[in-house]
Image (cartoon, rainbow, N blue to C red):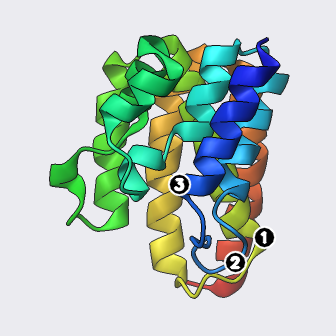
């Protein structure tokens, strides 16, 4: 794995996400792509996939445009980031509806993008299970259903990451059950 490329992508993502915080948890946003990248690296991903994991929310959540990703990190990384980026027309949708669109979109995604997406969903669901976000049980349950649908589509790309997601999903389910619906 090219440590210089991965370090460069981590640095670029940290700059792009500077000042952003995770919803509800108050943690710096960069922690999320770092978690996703670590998970795919542990799962055996190559440097391009790890870079895409680090950059997966940059185009969606910052002012960075897709061509800049290609210029700095190459066409494969840019293509993976594109597969992982929500479509602009989904922006106004409620989160559970947007997640349902993602599940449908990932039916035709590459195995590498699916691997990153499972890690992304694991990180998100684990955070929702661990911290108080202000969301009610109904919202959390809808989010979890949509995340499970996305992971079901992506599961063949990484059964190991899918199992990690399943553990986080069970924790979130217990949290929801404790809240009452």
Q: Which residue is drawn at the image coordinates 52% and 85% (left, top)?
A: 136
Of 18 and 138, which appears nearest the observer? 18
- Please give the name of the residue rendered at 70% of the width and 69% of the height, measured from the top-left corner: 28
Q: Residues within 10 Å of mark 3 (few under 14, many from 20)?
A: some
Above or below 13: residue 157: above
Name the disc covering residue 25, or none: 2
Residue hosting label 1 = 130
Whole-number angstrom distance, CA of label 2 to CA of label 1:
9 Å
Measured in 3D between alpha carbons, the distance from the residue under mark 3 to the one under mark 2, in whole angstroms, is 20 Å
Q: Is residue 164 visible?
A: yes
Residue at image point 84% right, 25% down: 42
Seen from the viewer's position, the closer of residues 19 and 72 is 72
Looking at the image, residue 166 lies above or below residue 21: above
Q: Position of residue 78 (x, y in %)?
A: 42, 24
Residue 117 on image: x %, y %: 54, 34
Q: Residue at x 61, y 20 (%)?
A: 49
- Residue 43 in sight from this viewpoint: no
Residue extending farthest to the right is 42
Residue 146's place in the image compared with 94, above or below, is above
Nearer the viewer's eye, disc 2 or disc 1? 2
In the rendered structure, the answer to whether residue 112 lies left or right of residue 99 reads right
Q: Mark 2 falls on what kind of element?
A: loop
Instruction: Tell which of 98 and 29 is nearer to you.
Output: 29
The quarter holding residue 31 reads bottom right
Residue 99 position, x and y percent, is 37, 51
Horizontal relation, residue 158 to residue 109: left or right = right
Q: Report the disc number at residue 16.
A: 3
Q: Give the SS element for disc 3.
A: helix
Q: Do residues under tags 2 and 1 come within 8 Å of each other at their CB atoms?
A: yes
Q: CA distance from mark 3 to mark 1?
A: 26 Å
């Amino acid at each position: 794995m090219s440590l210089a490329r991965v370090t460069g992508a981590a640095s670029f993502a940290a700059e792009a996400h500077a000042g952003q915080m995770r919803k509800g948890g108050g943690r710096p946003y960069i922690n999320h792509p770092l978690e996703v990248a670590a998970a795919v690296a542990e799962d055996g991903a190559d440097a391009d996939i790890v870079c895409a994991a680090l950059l997966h929310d940059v185009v969606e959540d910052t002012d960075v445009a897709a061509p800049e990703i290609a210029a700095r990190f190459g066409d494969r990384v840019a293509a993976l980031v594109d597969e992982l980026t929500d479509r602009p027309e989904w922006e106004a949708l409620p989160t559970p509806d947007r997640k349902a669109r993602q599940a449908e979109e990932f039916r035709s995604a590459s195995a590498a993008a699916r691997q990153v997406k499972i890690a992304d969903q694991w990180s998100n669901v684990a955070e929702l299970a661990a911290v108080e976000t202000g969301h009610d049980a109904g919202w959390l349950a809808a989010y979890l259903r949509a995340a499970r649908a996305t992971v079901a589509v992506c599961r063949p790309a990484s059964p190991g990451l899918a199992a990690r997601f399943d553990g986080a999903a069970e924790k979130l389910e217990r949290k929801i059950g404790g809240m009452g619906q």
